[in-house]
Amino acid sequence: MGSIKTFSETKVALAALLCVGITAIFTLPILPIDETRSLSVAWEMWTRKSFLLPLLNGQPYAHKPPLLFWLIHLTWFIFGVNEVTPRLIPMFFAMANIFLVYRVSLQLWPGDKKTAKYATLLLSVTLVYLVWSFLILYEMLLTFWVLVAVHGILSASKAGGKRPWLQITLGIGGGILTKGPVVLVHVVPLLVLAPWWNRMPKDRLPGWYGRAFGSCLLGLLLAGLWVAPAVIQGGEAYRHALLWRQTAARVVASFAHRRPLWWYIPVLPLLFLPWIFFLGIWKGIFTKEIRDTGWRACVTWFVSTLIILSFVSGKQAYYPIPATPAVILLFARNLRLREDMAPVPWRTRGMGIVLTILGGIFLLSSWASVSMNTGRLSLGEVAPIACVLLGFGIFFLVHTFFSPGAVLKTTAICVTVVFSLFLATTGKIFLKKYDLKPLALLINAKMEKRDCVAFVGTYHGEFQFLGRLHRPLISLKGESYKKFLAAHPDCLVIDTLKAGKAQGLKKEDFCYIQPFREQRVIFMTRGEIYLDIFGR
């Protein structure tokens, strides 16, 4: 009975992730370009039995290591090739991270189980974490390995023994096999700055840094068990892309997602939705009362990671996700201390106002065109989510809570219900324009009859898995399409065009067209027709 009480908040956190994850499985298409690319790489490795060397469209794929692909293969080995079990992988790791955050919290503040329970709830429905918990991407896996390493660092800072250092080694090795050396950005600063956040005596420093170096080196060697044979098999171009272009080159001058140094500053509030609307959670987070060893460790973890990521040329809003547990733990600790120091009734007007405004926006969207490809939504399509938002909004405006735990549980239920309902109703309509499966199946049927199917532009593997293709598409980048299509006038052509350019085409000119994002993706019957109409 005591165990159930202890983990009650954790159970709510796990239920929230499970509910949203299952809803996503039954409602979401495989989203381009990131999810389709992940599954296409796994599919080509599977069909070609290339389990050492990742492949995309017939070529070695150096952008990501193979751990996610191996896990997808494991589910396919057990259940057969399918689209459902790959979504279970990030969901499983998102749930595992809840338990790890609980354990990390107890390492930071021993005996304070309430802070640990609050942290699990706060993390589970932090919006960016919740969204990435069901996407077939790398962040939940990377967060898992970072938390494993952080738990090891905290354990090693308190006691000796080999186990904590083996944890750090495992975390670094697993992180590199998941998303490359970026795991070091999240782990190494916490190791290096341990004398500051842990107030470590000087006589411990040589031993600490020696073991830290050894663990990092062993982690690199663990990942090297895959890297070494992969680069031998992949050849010179693959070796250069994996060891240079995907690491050092991204830091200096990224070939994708290049942003200015300050770019993460305006992004920070988005990382902690919806908790930025609860003043009681983060107010006073820098006061003297909270600044202990655990506080310093969390600040070191998050701030150092953010600074390093800011100096990296390529930036995306989700790159700091593995460091967000540090701030979540600070929120939880602050909430716990404020509860002890001055227990007062909780009013949640900020959240109430936001939900009410969102509900109004959804209602108004039935009177205006949402986007070029979505058009105008009917009242019946937006009414369910609008009513739920307004209902929760009014509740948060008028209700008085008498404990932080009640606030967190109610918010978790609110976010889970609203997000799941959005995926199942209005969001499903929005995401129709991202579903490329019908086109992918048509490409498969055409490739069985014809030898030539070409994609104009940079091909990211959008169709390989969705269409279960067994041959590469011809990718025509830049101006190369002109020469190729002139030499192969009967080649089928796929291209993504602005909506205006796709208008006025004759039905006999194409065999398929559909909305895609704010554009149109078109499958044209002959290369010579494509050249006549779109040749530039």
Image (spheres, rainbow, N blue to C red):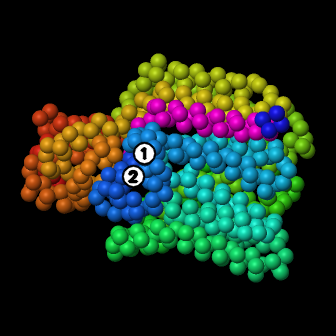
Q: Earlier in the sequence, mark 2 or mark 1?
A: 2
**Residue 292 in the figure: left or right of residue 167:** right
Q: Main secondary structure of the magenta part?
A: helix
**Residue 97 in the figure: left or right of residue 34:** right
Q: Identify the residue shown where x is 33% and y is 39%.
A: 436
Of 4 and 30, nearer the camera is: 4
Q: Which residues are magenta?
A: 5-33
Query: In which quadrant is the C terminus drawn?
Result: bottom left
Magenta stretch holds residue 10: yes
Is residue 458 visible to the viewer in this orientation of the structure?
no
User: Disc 2 and disc 1: Cα gap in Å?
Assistant: 10 Å
- According to the image, label 1 marks what residue? 76
Q: Label 2: few (<14), some or many (≥20) within 10 Å? A: many
Of 80 and 442, nearer the camera is: 80
**Residue 366 in the figure: left or right of residue 205:** left
Q: Are marks 2 and 1 in contact (CB under 8 Å)?
A: yes
Residue 256 picture location, percent across and down: 42, 61
Of 295 and 518, nearer the camera is: 295
Residue 96 position (above or below residue 253):
above
Query: In which quadrant is the N terminus drawn?
Result: top right
Of all residues, the one furthest to the top in this rendering is: 380
Residue 339 picture location, percent across and down: 86, 41
Residue 189 position (above or below residue 434):
below
Residue 258 picture location, percent across and down: 46, 62
Kindly report which numbered mark, 2 or 1, lies closer to the viewer in this rendering: 1
Of all residues, the one furthest to the front in this rendering is: 78
Is residue 57 visible to the viewer in this orientation of the structure?
yes
The disc placed on residue 440 is none
Callout count: 2
- According to the image, label 2 marks what residue? 42
Amino acid at dot 1: Trp
